[in-house]
């Protein structure tokens, strides 16, 4: 890889990191339209068994009501590991701690896990093609069944 190619790859990785940071920001700021715009039209989202969506329109429906369900959220992501599939597709892995303050009188819910994502470059912009959340453990979290992390015994 030439110096120019390496520099371009670093710039692309920074753009990918920005998409992932924007996702957490838009979620925490209750901006579902902006969140949905980070996904391609034929996206797949899998947060837990029976909790996800196929396609951007279905994903928008999944986001309906997040503002009335949560008083606040705080998503903390590690720097992503980025594996290049092609110049326009990457697979990523990010560690997550997410804290949820509910509108109902109940303890704050905490999720510990990892995102496994595929992002593609769509009309010059990096977007999520597939987002899978795998859960390590939770504390007082509203979703009772998560996708298993797959940890070795």
Image: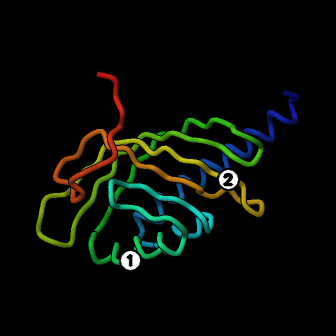
Q: Quadrant of residue 73?
A: bottom left
Residue for badge 1: 64
Q: Residues within 10 Å of mark 2 (few under 14, many from 20)?
A: many
In the rendered view, tell whether residue 8 sits above or below residue 48.
Answer: above
Depth check: give the residue in front, 42 or 22: 42
In the rendered view, tell whether residue 1 sits above or below residue 99.
Answer: above
Q: Give left or right: position of 99 versus 54.
A: left
Cα distance, mark 1 to mark 2? 25 Å
Q: Where is residue 152 drawn, in percent x and y?
A: 34, 23
Q: Give left or right: position of 111 versus 35.
A: left
Q: Where is residue 91 drawn, in percent x and y?
A: 60, 41
**Which one is earlier in the sequence, the residue at label 1 or at label 2?**
1
Q: Give left or right: position of 85 versus 62.
A: right
Residue at image position (38%, 77%) is 64
Q: Tell me the tag on residue 127.
A: none
Q: Quadrant of residue 101?
A: bottom left
Residue at disc 2, secondary structure: strand
Residue at image position (40%, 71%) is 62
Residue for badge 2: 120
């Amino acid at each position: 890889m030439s110096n120019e190619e390496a520099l371009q790859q670093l710039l692309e990785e920074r753009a990918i990191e920005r998409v992932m940071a924007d996702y957490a920001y838009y979620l925490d700021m209750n901006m579902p339209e902006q969140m949905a715009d980070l996904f391609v039209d034929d996206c797949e989202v899998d947060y837990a068994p029976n909790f996800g969506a196929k396609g951007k329109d279905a994903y928008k429906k999944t986001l309906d009501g997040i503002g009335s369900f949560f008083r606040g959220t705080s998503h903390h992501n590690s720097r992503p590991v980025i594996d290049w599939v092609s110049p326009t597709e990457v697979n990523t892995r990010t560690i997550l701690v997410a804290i949820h303050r509910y509108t109902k009188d109940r303890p704050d819910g905490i999720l510990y896990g990892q995102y496994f994502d595929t992002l593609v470059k769509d009309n010059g912009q990096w977007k999520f093609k597939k987002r899978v959340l795998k859960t390590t453990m939770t504390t007082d979290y509203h979703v009772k069944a998560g996708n298993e992390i797959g940890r070795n015994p």
